[in-house]
Image (tube, coloured by chain):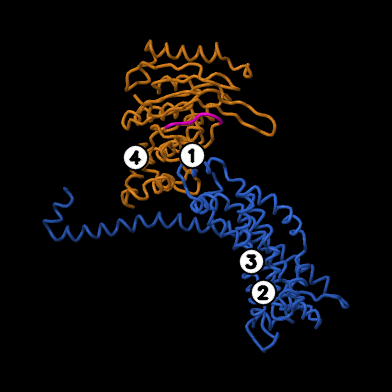
Chain colours: A blue, B orange
Amino acid sequence: MSMSMPAMKTEATAAALPSNAHAAPVVTMMPKRAPRTETYARMAREAAVRVVPPVIVIALLLVIWELICRRAGSTLPPPSRVFKDTKELIFDPFFDRGGIDKGLFWHLSASLQRVALGYSLAAVAGIALGTLVGQSVWAMRGLDPLFQVLRTIPPLAWLPLSLAAFRDGQPSAIFVIFITSIWPIIINTAVGIRNIPQDYRNVAAVVQLNPLEFFTKIMIPAAAPYMFTGLRIGIGLSWLAIVAAEMLIGGVGIGFFIWDAWNSSHISEIILALFYVGIIGFVLDRLIAGLGKVVTRGTVAN
Amino acid sequence: MQAYLKLDHIDKTFTRGSATTEVLKEINLTIDKGEYVSIIGHSGCGKSTLLNIVAGLTGTTNGCVLLENREVNSPGPDRAVVFQNHSLLPWLTVYENVKLGVDKVFAKTKTRAERDAWVMHNLNLVQMAHARDKRPNEISGGMKQRVGIARALAMEPKVLLLDEPFGALDALTRAHLQDSVMALHQKLGNTILMITHDVDEAVLLSDRIVMMTNGPSARIGEVLEVPLARPRKRLELAANSSYLKCRQRVLEFLYERHRFVEAA
């Protein structure tokens, strides 16, 4: 109060007060900025700790590869040759000269579309079947032996049969993705449902949730960590299967691109394609893992 | 006078393969409205089974449970349970955990705003309103149990079933929570059936203590009236002669006449 009294009386002090008030925030800004740069520095250090080791390892491997494959008569190209041969493919992934003469983007997106379709079907059917098997003892007794046998069949062994059934490459490839990725989803979902603590079931019983509410409010969240384990294995398997399946069915797709490159002895293109396949497989895995992390937030840590 | 809750000639036999075990034999008990009854016994005597039977989570082999003269044999919000290990759903917040029951029980009788206010009212009763947006793994064991009590109270049960509600807590938290439950019972006048293995807890909280013999074929050995006026104060009771007499009586039952043989 005593401070504001003179400010009201004379203009001079009134003008002096705001400038004082201005000075104050400037002073407080200083200590605020210092820790911020510190946190940036710490973040940079943490990033460096993560990034530097793999960069060194990759650089080393490239050097070794270069040294080994540089000799005359080497069957595989060194990294420098790979880069020179595939420069066009790397820098122009979007060209389309009709037929199968397309940029890598189109091949990869064709493969990803097949995976997206087959995997989505597998996720829906797998979670439904897994819930059934996890919830019902009779369904488990009836279906589990069947699942255990079917899941050991290699993906490509299904391809001739599905070609015979669908008489077309596209649905056959999607079916192979589906049948490959569904088993881990079914089995993990079933384990998750079976492991729902009796306490949660008791809570649901006392509150009198109906079966649908029990499914959405208790079962799905309680089993979600297991489901995502299955979904993650599934996406990995489906990416494995698509490359092999596309080699056989032909058309547009990264698998056929690799096979075609082999037939035309473009070894560098194969290496580039493998690099992309690896990166995309990694991204798909991280994507499902990240989704799982968001969805199961709070469920895992109990 | 008609009994509010009546356990009528209850037998319970578990069958596993060809082996059958008789857990409970000829349990008869009537509980009046507003009464606080504890069931005490050694572990394995089937007292939790008995509570599950009243809750409807376990069926009886013979006999039945009558609530206001109507047989109850399936679980329902009229017999809300506070579980021993809180059993909060870890993916829901404190508020959502309580809301789950409220939304079902008052789906038709309360509007959305009323239900929200009712959830908060019950969280306030157990002094947990401040943690409404926390998840169970972010709060302490005692707090979780408070939320468990709020969830049960919010269903407006005719009988509140407490299954060793303070068993998993440390001694200080336990005493604190016992006082809270006593205050709630005083304020709301609930009918409460509590399972416990703690003699002091039973005497402090109950109007009557039901002492069970050891299993198999456990039965009600003795029922003790606790003639202590409410509200009861923990510190004052420590020197109260009828408190000590009751305590003595239960201890004698448990440790002299029905010693737990396997524990020796």
Circle on res. A59: none
Q: Which residue is mark 4?
A: B124
In magenta segment, residue A198: no
In the rendered structure, are the residues bearing label 1 and label 4 in contact, judged by CB atoms less than 8 Å apart?
no
Amino acid of disc 4: Asn
Tell if the residue under mark 4 belongs to the same chain as the one under mark 3: no
Q: Which residue is mark 1?
A: B74
**Which residue is painted at 44% across and 32% down in the image?**
B161
Q: For the residue labelled by badge 1, is the local secondary structure a helix, a strand or a loop?
A: loop
**Which residue is painted at 71% across and 64% down in the image?**
A180
Q: Quadrant of residue A19?
A: bottom left
Q: Quadrant of residue A77?
A: bottom right
Crowding around mark 2 (Cα neighbors within 10 Å: few <14, some 14 to 19, many 20+) is: many
Q: Quadrant of residue B78?
A: top left
Query: How many angstroms separate mark 3 from mark 2 (CA)?
Result: 12 Å
Q: Range of the magenta residues?
A: B61-66
Q: Which residue is mark 3?
A: A119
Label 3: chain letter: A
Query: How many angstroms separate mark 3 from mark 1 (CA)?
Result: 41 Å
